[in-house]
Amino acid sequence: MSDENTMKILVVGSGGREHALVWSLIHTSQRPLKVFCAPGNAGITELAGTVDIDAIDIGGLADFAATQEIDLTIVGGEAALAAGIADEFARRNLLIAAPTRNAARLESSKSFAKSFMTRHGIPTAHHRTVASLEAARECLRSGEFGNAETPVVVKADGLAAGKGVHVTASHAEALLRVEELMNANAHPASSDISSAVVVLEEKLEGAEVSLLLWTDGRDYILMPPARDHKRIGENDTGANTGGMGVITSHDILDAATLEEIKRTIVEPTLHGAREEGFAFRGVLYIGLMLTAGGARVIEYNARPGDPETQAILVRLKSDLVEIFQAVAHGRLREVNVEWSEDASVCVVLAARGYPNKPEIGHVIEGLETFDVHDDVRVFHAATTRRDNQWLTAGGRVLGVTATAAHLDDALAKCYDAVARIKWDGMNYRRDIGRFKGDDAVAPRKKA
Ligand code: AMP
Ligand code: GLY
């Protein structure tokens, strides 16, 4: 039934981020669209055709795009990028708005990203890459990471879905974590992430900001800065997760700091990538720490963030299809992107056990009551449908997203909506948008 003017789009991935991408593509497009999502989730089936092909089956995805004559493919997650989806699509002349495998190393290898930043003078935490426990011990003993009581951050080199990072309180704890990561294969019970190479990093203090942008390799367009809340527990306690909630609001970054970040971080990154022969095309996500000494890069991601994407796209007023087309065609210079002035928030509803062993299969109640309010949206991250019921199907299950002129109103609206949803073991942070960083909550010293 599709007429000639209908554009066919494939979104690769299955989380809340992909639900938000699909919704935003349809919501902002000036042209009729037919959207597919591979593999998608139950929530996404309400908007798009879901296709049972795994996000890392890049041959299968390219076959699908070729036979269905997909006009444009957009990628949510890092695994497909690291597997080389953009290279495979380019080889087969299929249009895709995503970075190549080489460009995606900015995310897929922390040691590569750190040495890239060093080569291009991009401000980041002091670091050392080590390939043995002995090397880690020697490095800590040398004094370059302070004394034995100095906090050190320990990171697995490769992709770990946010679970390969340990912010430790002392050198002894850091060594324990290095040992766990390096020996995970021998002792699978101690850690489910294994890494032969580990990055040691100075611990940075300050507020975190997620700065996302579209780039065609040369030009770029910034999205509204966002603040993620990565720890599982309130007041930023407990394990690191993929992200438990995000806000966007005008006061996350002031204009002068943003200018400094563009000059010292964004532009040198895009320029450095071009210079090293892997012009970055797609969405670049720069994780920043605003330290007393200026902004520093914590990490790069070669893809849109989750749940950043949910909170950002509800503010987009321009045609998202046109933006991604311009990214893929190298014509971003011709595009003008407009945003609503609102603040926004996305609160993640997670399953008991997340981020380690989430319980799945619980019936979700309250979802039927949604869909009427334009300024509250529930994006599905991991749900299935059975006998007319919604069931939980993963760790992060839903992302409740709201907008309002002021952050406080967006938060109130969002938490009102959260209160209407429940399942056995539903867990979420009640301090999204309230917790700003260690400095902001440090107890006042008594005079
Ligand atoms: P990453 O996967 O590198 O973004 O790390 C996950 C989270 O760990 C970050 O969002 C920070 O909250 C924390 N983290 C990572 N590196 C550092 C660092 N050098 N100093 C302080 N916190 C860090
Ligand atoms: N929310 C953090 C991430 O997408 O990596």
Image (tube, helix red, strand yellow):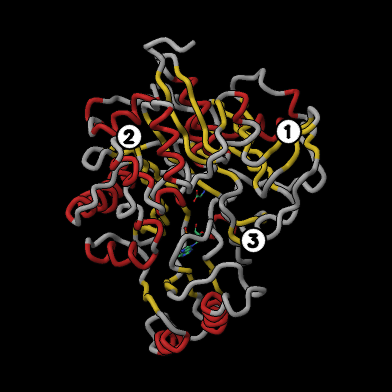
Residue in the image at 57% along x and 75% along y = 185
State the quadrant of the C terminus.
bottom right
Q: Is residue 162 above or below residue 375?
A: below
Of mark 2 and mark 1, the one earlier in the sequence is 2
Marker disc for residue 385: 1
**Few, some or many residues within 10 Å of mark 1 (<14, 14–19, 20+):** some
Assess whether mark 1 and mark 2 are in contact (beta carbons under 8 angstroms).
no
* Lateral position of residue 231 relative to residue 225, left or right: right
Q: Nearer the viewer, residue 182 or 245?
A: 182
- From the viewer's perspective, is residue 329 above or below residue 351? above
Pick the residue in front: 32 or 206.
32
Residue where numbered disc 2 is placed: 94
Tag of residue 237: 3
Amino acid under label 2? Leu
Observer able to see residue 171: yes
Q: Earlier in the sequence, mark 3 or mark 2?
A: 2
